[in-house]
Amino acid sequence: MKPIPNLRRMLAVLLLTIAVLLNCGGCTEPDPAATLAVTTTASVSISSLEITNCERAVLEIGSFYQLETNVPAELTDELEWSASNDSATVDGNGKVAAVSEGKVAVTVRMGELSDSVLFEIIEPAPDIPDSTEREEFYGDYEPAASNAEAALRSEQGLISGSITVPDQVPDVSDYQPSADGKLIRNSKAYFLDENTYVVVNAYGEEVLRVYRAGGYITLEEVAAYVYAFGDVPANYVSDKKTEPEDSIWGEYLRLNHTKFSGNTSKYPYEPELPNISGCGGDLTYYEIDIGTTGNDCDPQYTPNIYNNGQSITRGAARIVYARFDADGDKIVDPDEKYVFYTYNHYNDFQEYLNYFGGWGEMFGNITGGGTISSKYNYNPTPYVETVVAALHKRVQVTAVVYWDFRKDPFGIAA
């Protein structure tokens, strides 16, 4: 006669329990080194507890994932779920909800048995527009109108400022304030809030705004961004070999955010920038590319478009700026906020004066009559000092009335 199934199962459990007790040696507390544990409920038992679907170790914020175990359906009510921190939550059924960035361990327990899996919670991947959507976006283009809009655009690889690729030579303002025979470098910072910087003209009138985390390509906007935030726009990467197809920015990708040596012993045609660490000073300078429409002053660089959407020709135009002080801190002192532009590969520089069209007098090797990038025939002129002060507001006269007091003392004729 065949054994009764339930009786046979209960007999097996009983024998297994006796074996565990004998292995424990009569101890009253569980042995942490025990390799076998048994949980029984009525006629159902398990000897190990495992999360069986842990192949997804990364979750995006806002997503969910249902964990499963090897526990029979009859025992799932006895499972206890927990998360190690607030990066995720888990309900009584093992459903994980990703909440914030970080790493979190999700654990399931049943009596003395337990198992855990580790999740990394990340920001959700941006919803990248396809080529048709990009064409529509740029076909009816307007610059971003707020920091929130700029940040959202950057997540999708979309520009926040002007999309007109700049010429290599900067447009200098017709009026440039001066004091004591020197051009004024505007000391006033025009922040609406910590993420919004207003770019003014030489008269102190608003021209445009740049937003932290926005993407920018024009010389004026990038220079203002660097001056205001001490960092680079969102469409810049440090790797000089990145291709447009490797980035969500496509043709608006810009390269090179690296330390500028300023070593005039190695490069004697370069002029010495103010207080630069490469010549024993206290300020560490960095450089970035400015993608212009070509180069007609240096035979080492061909006059190609910087980024045509398929490949990048880096050219000779750079912004070089003082990024860190002697203590390694970001520079906030207006006296040390130096931003320069060179379009002939460090031979000559012009200082950004913190207003639209505010570009200082050119100084350097070609200015001094040297041969471009020559280590033998060079003559770099020194930095042209500026005065750090607030802009003067000049009154524009639109009409002139001449009045002869002797002929008309009361101004009646006027």
Image: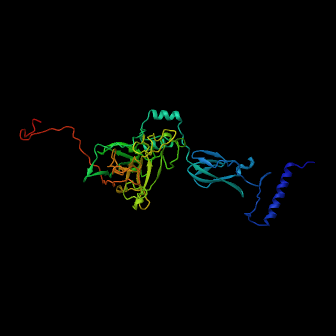
- Image coords of residue 236 (percent x, y): 47, 47
Is residue 194 among what the camera can see?
A: no
Count of all numbered marks drawn on residues in the image: 0
The one of 242 and 11 positioned closer to us in this rendering? 242
- Image coords of residue 225 (percent x, y): 41, 48
The one of 278 and 224 positioned closer to us in this rendering? 278
- Image coords of residue 178 (percent x, y): 27, 50
Q: Is residue 70 left or right of residue 241?
A: right
The one of 169 and 236 positioned closer to us in this rendering? 169
Question: Does 259 appear above or below 295?
Answer: below
* Residue at the extreme left of the image, as rendered: 406
Is residue 226 among what the camera can see?
A: yes
* Residue at the extreme front of the image, as rendered: 376
- Image coords of residue 187 (percent x, y): 32, 52
Q: Quadrant of the C terminus?
A: top left
Q: In this view, does 98 lie to the left or right of 205?
A: right
Say how the picture is coloured: rainbow
Q: In this view, does 13 lie to the left or right of 189?
A: right
